[in-house]
Amino acid sequence: DADVTQTPRNRITKTGKRIMLECSQTKGHDRMYWYRQDPGLGLRLIYYSFDVKDINKGEISDGYSVSRQAQAKFSLSLESAIPNQTALYFCATSDLIAGGPIEQFFGPGTRLTVL
Amino acid sequence: DQQVKQNSPSLSVQEGRISILNCDYTNSMFDYFLWYKKYPAEGPTFLISISSIKDKNEDGRFTVFLNKSAKHLSLHIVPSQPGDSAVYFCAASALGQGAQKLVFGQGTRLTINP
């Protein structure tokens, strides 16, 4: 079974709809992240959480919100989807190692299309 | 402002030859660098990393070189194999500043031709 799972894998929705993307992990990591990938722009950080009570905005948080329901679950919501939120969304996790490597482990991605 | 830049969107290399992917950064606080590989319909997977205290790190066919004075790193793949065809992202972090966030480049699509 995959260590980091994302649901749904594909979603088509209409402008103005509320959408939730879910991420679950079995790696036991404290830190979780949401990124979006756009052609020519690489991966950009939307939100990140270093534990259940910690939520931080990333580079491009406007129009998004998150919820860390448990150590293993981190959800991303688009309250009112707009077409320029069409992108590939990735969840990632990392372990807490003070001063140590910061390798992040990624889920398979969710392809979101907003019409 | 793009702090990590991969200026080549694509690269085509013949099988068996060396592939060299480049990455430049602007933030002098970055002290830890990673390369990720991404296949279609999959998430990025970690490939190799390097700390700023080193100038080279090698893992099998993959070697990463870091030139701190030029704020430049490169990934060498030798010999290149068809399975290496993927998008490669470089990423950087200011680990010494307590930041565990990664800043990614735009990616380079590598195609290995038989």
Image: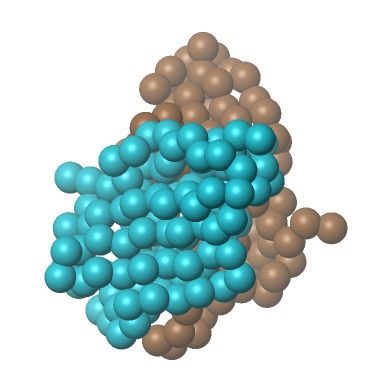
Chain colours: A brown, B cyan
Q: Residue furthest bottom?
A: A98
A68 or A86, which is in the foreground?
A: A86
Residue that protrudes farthest toward the right in the picture? A1
As displayed, is residue B31 above or below residue A19?
below
Q: What count of labels does the image hold?
A: 0
From the viewer's side, name the closer residue of A57 and A4: A4
Q: Nearer the viewer, residue A70 or B93?
A: B93
Q: Position of residue B63 (x, y in %)?
A: 48, 67
Q: Quadrant of residue A57?
A: bottom left
Q: Residue at x 57, y 73 (%)?
A: B59
Which residue corresponds to the image point at 36% horizontal and 68% vertical from the top-left?
B65
Of residues B70 and A109, the one nearer the viewer is B70
Quadrant hosting residue B45: bottom right
Residue A21 visible within the image: no
Q: Residue at x 21, y 71 (%)?
A: B68
In the image, residue A20 lies at what x, y percent? 59, 37
State the quadrant of the C terminus of chain B. Answer: top right
Q: Quadrant of the N terminus of chain B?
A: top left
Rendering quarter of residue B54: bottom left
Image position of B74 with respect to A36: above or below: below
Is any atom of residue B9 visible in this view?
yes
> Where in the figure is residue B77, as x and y percent of width and height?
52, 57
Q: Residue at x 23, y 46 (%)?
A: B2
